[in-house]
Image: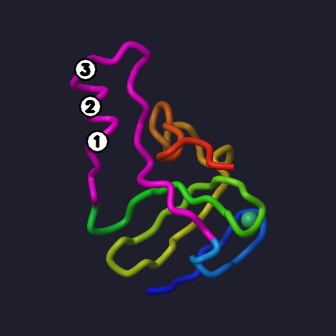
Amino acid sequence: MSFVLRCPNCGPREVTDFGFGGELIPRPRSQPSFRELNAYNYFRRNVAGVQREWWFHRSGCRVWFIAERDTRTNEVLWTARPSEVASDERGAEVAEPEGGRRR
Ligand SMILES: [Zn+2]
C-alpha cells in the first residue's frame, strides 16, 4: 500500500522515498535494570490506531523526523522535526530511531 508523507524539509513525497524508523519509544533512565533494558530493546506497543513514529527521508534531505500515523489506514496526521515536538509530547526523553542514525 502506498501513501504520501510530508517531509518537514521537502514537502509531500511517496512513502517509498522514506525509511521507517519504528515507534517513538521513551529512552530508559540512565542506569536501567535488565528488565527495563529488555523492554526498551524488544517490546513494541504495535498499536492498531494512531502512533508516533520515526521516519528518515533517505531519497531526499536524509533527515530524521517524527510523524503521527494511523496504522489502520496509513493516514498521516502530521509530521515535524524532532525539535518542533515539545519534549513533554515526545515523552521525557525520546530514543533515537531503531538502528540509530543511518546516514
Ligand atoms: Zn526531506
> Which residue is at a point 36% across and 71% down the rendered structure image?
71
Horizontal side of residue 60 vs 91, given as left or right: right
Looking at the rendering, which quadrant does residue 83 occupy? top right
Looking at the rendering, which quadrant does residue 39 occupy? top left
Q: Is mark 3 within 8 Å of ligand 1?
A: no
Contact flag, marks 2 and 1 (Cβ < 8 Å): yes
> Which residue is at a point 28% across and 58% down the rendered structure image?
46
Quadrant of the rendering where the N terminus is positioned: bottom left
Q: Position of residue 20 (x, y in %)?
A: 51, 62
Report ligand 1 position as a quadrant. bottom right
Q: Is residue 41 magenta?
A: yes
Type of residue at label 1?
A: Tyr
Type of residue at label 2?
A: Asn
Contact flag, marks 3 and 2 (Cβ < 8 Å): yes
| Residue beneath disc 2 | 38
Q: Position of residue 56 (x, y in %)?
A: 62, 59
Q: Earlier in the sequence, mark 3 or mark 1?
A: 3
| Residue beneath disc 1 | 42
> Of all residues shown, which one is farthest toward the left?
35
Horizontal side of residue 61 vs 79, given as left or right: right
| Residue beneath disc 3 | 34
> Which residue is at a point 44% across and 54% down the rendered structure image?
22
Q: Secondary structure at mark 2?
A: helix
Q: Is mark 2 within 8 Å of ligand 1?
A: no
Read off the magenta span.
18-46
Type of residue at label 3?
A: Phe
Q: Secondary structure at mark 1?
A: helix
Horizontal side of residue 83 vs 40, given as left or right: right
> Which residue is at a point 45% across and 38% down the rendered structure image?
91
Q: Position of residue 28 (x, y in %)?
A: 38, 26
Q: Position of residue 45 (x, y in %)?
A: 27, 52
